[in-house]
Amino acid sequence: MFAAAVLLCLAFTGSVAQAQVDSGVIRLGSSNASAETGEAVQIQEPRRGFDRDSFEGRLESLWFQRKALLADGRTDDANAQLERIRAFCFEEGVTRLEYLSGALISEAHRYLAEGNQAQVYTALQYAEAFDAGRPQIHLARAAAHWEFSGGLVKTCQELLRAMSSSWSRGLRDLTLAHQVAFVLGLALAGAVIVFSLLMLLRYQVPFRHEVQEWVCGFSSAEWGAAAGWFVLGLPLLSWFGAGWAFVYWIVITFRFMRRSERVVATVLLLASMMALPTYNVTIAMFGTTADPAVRNTVSAAVGEYDPDRIVKLRHLVEEHPDDPVYHFLLAQLYTNGRFLEEAFEEYRLAIELQPGLVPAFINIGNVFYMTGQYREAVVNYTRALEHDPKSFLAHFNMHLAQSEDFRFTDAEETLAQARAIDSRRVAGLLASSGAVGDRSRVQDATMHMASIWESAMGGRRSVRFSSERSASGASLGVPKLINAISVVSLLGIFCCYATLLMSRSKGAARRCIRCGRPFCHHCKSSHDEAKEYCSQCMHLFVLGDGLEPGTKQRKLFEVERYEKRWRRIRALFSVVMPGTGQLLKGKTGLGLILMVVWIAAVIAAQPVALVPVERLLGADLQASVFLRSSSVPVVYGADPLAFVALLALLPIWLVGNLWRRKRWVT
């Protein structure tokens, strides 16, 4: 009877355990033992919850004890206290504390001013421990190397690390993309204005000649010359027209331009059409990336465990309880912090909201795997494969779980299926996954970044997978194209080609390429082989039939004076703004590229260069350039775009001015 009772109890216990598996209840904190060998398998022990208030209270206590030690001059004890703080954070699973790192950077800055070399490097060492890879740490260390004769090489290495870190962080949170887009937009706007002025300078003489010839048909030559200048400066006679002068000048000089210049003019007017919509999108991008909700969401997707992120993401979950993305991201952070019970619960809620959420099934399987419950892990990997039979991670992780459960035949079949999907990735994971103790490491699934951005920017309720499109629509609305700048630019393009079509029957007036004198079809008989020369230059340089000695001498002097004047003009423009000399020379493509890159580099390197433009236009452009997120403190500000722009200024200037050398002129 006693043996029967024991067997009955064992059977009841087994049935309860099976019921727990079937109901999805996660059993954490217990070690699995192999039925065949009886040996316990080492598993990852989960942690139970995280008391943020208790953590911060303890951290503040340790920090202020350190400050008291510093005030008493007990520097060694204060440094030992820093080590205790670091050990406490490590014990709690906290690997990143931005505010603590910022405080240590501020201390390093103060110690640097005092000349305390040892404390500078100690503060930066622990700042790195609390926020690894922070650009300000590298900049502070570079300043310390320079101040304490650490060597030019070490200083440059730290500067390069700071720039690399700034670029990676800027690309990750899209603040750098916003800055680049805004600077390029301003550079294109500046290029439109400069290009119109250059074309006006180059073709205003033949334009005025045509106006003068037309007016002389019914009035005197004096009125014709005045009419030419009047039509040229017509937009400047009213405050409303002055703002559109650059479009007007492109239109009136369009028929005189070369083919390449017409292409550039069309492209720049099209860029003007998109200027305001691009500006609005850029500002919206900054507003999005600077929004705390967006930054917390994206950082949670790509960042490590951080109690501060946990708290912020919890707030987002409370604000968007029906969005599976936030539950999934919160579960990921919990997993990174080894709070597996909380992670399991958040993954379960995400699946309830989105039953086909394959990454959540895979990661629940990983939670079971990390606690040694391999059969339950296989069950969840199988559920993931029911929704996505081509899921590589589900196959690979199932192979590991089946291997740990001594189901080697099934494990080999599953691994073969994974190899059929991506054999190279299988080989890489098997070679690099290594082991945790004697156990292989499963791979966590991540959510498509498009779903994360949709939830971050709009709180949308659908999840996007790699092969799906969200049914909820685009995350950014189509910018308004109907605005004054776009309409005027479009009208400008229309007027450019209208004037070109209307003047097809007769050629446009030209300026002699040797002496600069304007002429039209009324001034000169047609000679196709000398269409770029005036009558006198044609006889002197093309036909070679000679001129009177006095006329020839005056003509040669006129030619020399014209060429010398334009060489000086091109040199002066090129020195001030590389690329303009090439545009005036006729090298349109190279000139435009150099000019746009130069303007962008100047704006990025020195935004104060926009101050005169702001005063002229009454706009606040410089403030928009400075719209960027930054870490505190800002005593060591790291702007990767400004650094690259400063390095690029000299090469751009050299390339833009080398054209003056004869060997560069073709």
Image: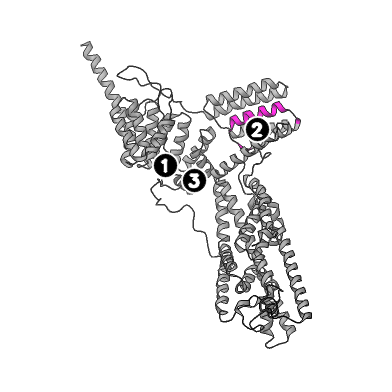
Residue kind at label 1, given as amino acid type: Pro
Camera-nearest residue between 565 and 289:
565
Q: Earlier in the sequence, mark 2 or mark 1?
A: 2
* Residue 227 location, quadrant: bottom right
Q: Name the residue beneath numbered marker 3.
A: 456
Residue under circle 2?
103
Quadrant for the N terminus in the image? top left
Who's the residue at 63% across and 71% down the image?
248
Q: Residue at x 62, y 49 (%)?
A: 627
Classify mark 1: helix, strand or loop. helix
Position of residue 152 measured from the top left corner of the image (x, y, whole percent): 70, 35
> How many C-alpha atoms fall within 10 Å of the one at disc 2: few (<14), some, or many (≥20)?
some
Q: Nearer the viewer, residue 619 or 20?
A: 619
Residue 603 percent coordinates (x, y):
66, 53
Mark 1, residue position? 324
Mark 1 residue crowding within 10 angstroms, few (<14) / some (14–19) / many (20+): many
